[in-house]
Image (cartoon, rainbow, N blue to C red):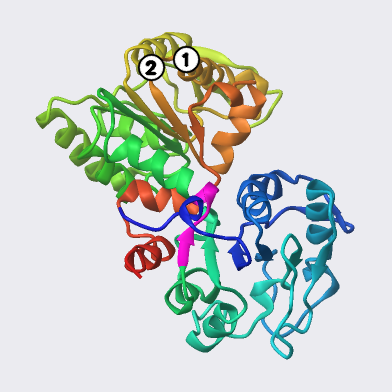
Amino acid sequence: MLFKKLSDQQLSGKSVLIRADMNVPIADGIITDDTRIRASLASIRFCLEHGAAVIVMTHLGRPKAGEPKPEDSIEPVARRLGELLQKPVTLLENWQQKAPELAAGTVAMLPNVRLNIGEKQNDAELAKAYARLADIYVNDAFGTAHRAEASTEAVAKAAPVACAGMLLTAELEALSQSLQQPRPPVVAIVAGSKVSTKLTILESLAEKVDILVVGGGIANTFLLAQGYKVGQSLAEPDLIEAAQRIMQKMQQKGGQVPLPTDVVVAKQFAADAPATIKAVADVAEDDMILDIGPQSAKALSELMATAGTIVWNGPVGVFEFDAFAQGTAVLAKAIAQSPAFSIAGGGDTLAAIAKFGVTDDMSYISTGGGAFLEFLEGKTLPAVAALCTRADT
């Protein structure tokens, strides 16, 4: 895919509008995790270092357009951004009434874009208002790239120049390397509670990868499709045919869908429930499968060691409960030690990576949840497509 990059732009004396994803958790006016703000710093600092004035815009929470409430205020985000940049960040409350005049090297923020009427509807007039604020529009919000909104899609069409920021560029290059130009063999790990929510991802990946690892409730449905009983485990019997179709597709191309041979079960879903290791053929009617067993975890580790590319979305067990975390822990450490290019995405996956201390050992960690999944599905991301249409203008 071809698009303009921020790193290639002439910025001295220019004004730059950056769409970031600083949708951070806030409790009682205090930011509890500033990871997304920190992830946006590279593009902002690049612009400042090259003599530009910067205006940042982001969404925050799920406010109702036109009805601002105190908890919708961007002020805590602007304050924290200022602390990280070690310079004041001005809030532009009346930006639509009076065009801001910013000196080179200064930073300002627009109020929460989700409060703007027409933002969610991708309104062209609102997008033109955004575009008039700056000489260059930069999309650096991969987390919202799958949404066609005024601050992500329409503004890219209206701006004098539209390009991808440092974070968005890194995301797209990492995803392209893992799925469009991968080093074989390619392993994809897709886990979660339901096949139905990730069916299109599984079907798409089955055409692209050499090994498709399924985990969690998804694996239980695949076990049903192989004739195994899963007791009281989370599964979707109505999607057995879909699971069989995916396994058949992988088999026809010489690929693998390695299913667990042993599992960790309990009689109830609880952190203190007694855990028992069983062969998959021995799962009882009142058992719940909550993790893969040590034999299955060892087999997955061996696959990771020989992989060329690994794409990971979803833990293979209830890793939040220590008694059922071992399978995901073994997998995480195997991916970390693998020579493969590894990319991981999704909230639960990132939480697992952090819990098992392998964050720094992943080749790339995606900041996007929905956008990451839609890219895996092979869908076009509207915000990225808009940048691609401006590649030559």
Q: Amino acid at mark 1?
A: Ala
Please identify the residue farthest to the front as the structure is shown: 12
Q: Does residue 88 sit above or below 193 in this rendering?
A: below
104 falls in the magenta region? no
Q: Nearer the viewer, residue 36 or 250?
A: 36
Please identify the residue farthest to the right as the structure is shown: 28
Which residue in the protein does label 2 denote? Answer: 304
Q: Are marks 1 and 2 in contact (CB under 8 Å)?
A: yes
Residue 333 x %, y %? 53, 16
Looking at the image, residue 292 sits to the left or right of residue 54; the answer is left
Residue 203 x %, y %? 25, 45
Q: Amino acid at mark 2?
A: Met
Neighbour class for label 1 at 10 Å: few (<14), some, many (≥20)?
many
What residue span does the magenta drawing correspond to?
A: 162-168
Dividing the image into 4 quarters, which one contains the C terminus? bottom left
Q: Nearer the viewer, residue 172 or 371?
A: 172
Q: Tell me which residue sits at (52%, 89%) in the image.
A: 125
Q: Which quadrant of the structure image shows residue 245?
A: top left
Which secondary structure, mark 1? helix
Q: Which quadrant of the structure image shows residue 267?
A: top right
| Numbered-mark total | 2
163 falls in the magenta region? yes
Which residue in the protein does label 1 denote? Answer: 334
- Going from N to C along the chain, the mark reached first, 1 or 2, is 2
Which secondary structure, mark 2? helix
Neighbour class for label 2 at 10 Å: few (<14), some, many (≥20)?
many
Looking at the image, residue 278 sits to the left or right of residue 199; the answer is right
Q: Nearer the viewer, residue 353 or 95?
A: 95
